[in-house]
Amino acid sequence: MQAALELYIERGFEQTTVAEIAKRAGLTERTFFRYFADKREVLFWGAMSLQELLVSTVATAPESEAPFATIRSAIEAAGSVFQDRREGALQRQSVITLNPELQERELIKLASLAAAMAGELRRRGVAEPNASLSAEAGIAVLKIAFESWVNDKGEMDLSQLIRETFDKLRAATAG
Amino acid sequence: MQAALELYIERGFEQTTVAEIAKRAGLTERTFFRYFADKREVLFWGAMSLQELLVSTVATAPESEAPFATIRSAIEAAGSVFQDRREGALQRQSVITLNPELQERELIKLASLAAAMAGELRRRGVAEPNASLSAEAGIAVLKIAFESWVNDKGEMDLSQLIRETFDKLRAATAG
């Protein structure tokens, strides 16, 4: 929803109304509300397809693969998606960074992504706590690599950053 | 605030009023509000002393210690505190589990704890992303070990569970 993102950047998230978004997008407000519960959800509707990507990557991994390797593949796949939509991802992040309530919503979505991946690992027979541990560690890597990428304005390759961050986690935990 | 916890368990969090909490605790409502912004905060005021414990453990760790080992010590120290206050911790968790809004608040507090530890590591000269990565991984271990402990009704030793979960994280990331 590029019209909404533009307005959030131009005027601030709090100051933007749904009426303004609908006008900029050439929609009625009624049509807007057919797709989004509120103006906040415009920023988070991508979480559903991200979750589908993560879960389907876990679901289709080779049976013999170690759970953490599976999570690593899923997070790297997510990184490619952000890299391909670099401009939109950076704009969205610039809006979220300015608003504590949106930051909280982002944390909760990240926790949901971890829970969804852990659920899929359990469905494949991975026991707890390994399922949750792998999924939570993977999401921590995504969050931290994503922050580095945003701070660098997307100049570095996110997939590469994710791989390096996984390697750093391995080195740190090896002690 | 045992009076509030008892009421949340007896009547449910949503159904309990501050007036009822104050009456049970033998306080005026005015006194209640001198300590807590709202009835939700009763459940989270311990987060401040937990954060102080985590940050001070990081702050006083030997300079030569690896950052992840420092985080591990801090999380183990937190585990001992929960173990010593087993009954209250389990009661509190039983309230939070029933309420999605409280679960979200808990996630946000956990993220704040990770951010506080990462900040203290950076103050000690640890570079990013290692500071955040160590802190976030440590909080993931605490969250998952704590869940196992609660599911087991606190019968297992939480400090032991935390040590085992750190070992499992190491084994998982080693691949």
Image (tube, coloured by chain):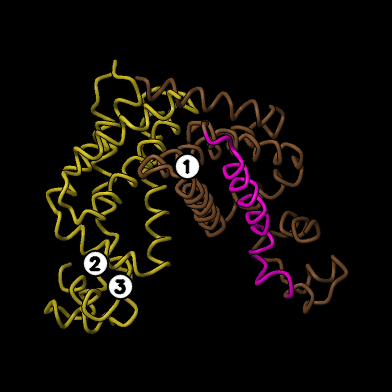
Chain colours: A yellow, B brown
A169 lies left or right of B121: left
Q: In the image, is residue B103 above or below residue B60?
A: below
> Residue at image x 14%, y 59%?
A87
Q: Which corner quadrant holds the C terminus of chain B?
A: top left
Which quadrant holds residue A92?
bottom left
Residue that label 1 marks: B135
Marks 3 and 1: which is nearer the front?
1
Mark seen at residue B5: none
The disc labelled 2 sits on which kind of residue?
Tyr
Could you say which is closer to the camera, residue B14 or residue B75? B75
Q: Which portion, as a residue range, is magenta? A: B34-63
- Secondary structure at badge 3 equals loop
Gap in angstroms between the C-alphas marked 3 and 1: 33 Å
Q: Which corner quadrant holds the N terminus of chain B?
A: bottom right
The answer as to whether the residues below labels 3 and 1 share one chain is: no
Circle 3/circle 1 CB separation < 8 Å: no
Residue that label 2 marks: A35
Q: Residue A157: horizontal and vertical position, in percent?
A: 16, 43
Circle 3 packing at 10 Å, graded few (<14), some (14-19), many (20+), is: some
| Chain under numbered label 2 | A
Residue that label 3 marks: A39
Gap in angstroms between the C-alphas marked 2 and 3: 10 Å
- Residue A34 in the magenta stretch? The answer is no
Q: Residue A152: horizontal and vertical position, in percent?
A: 22, 53
| Chain under numbered label 1 | B
- Secondary structure at badge 1 equals helix
Q: In the image, is residue A97 above or below residue A15?
A: above
Which residue extends farthest front? B63
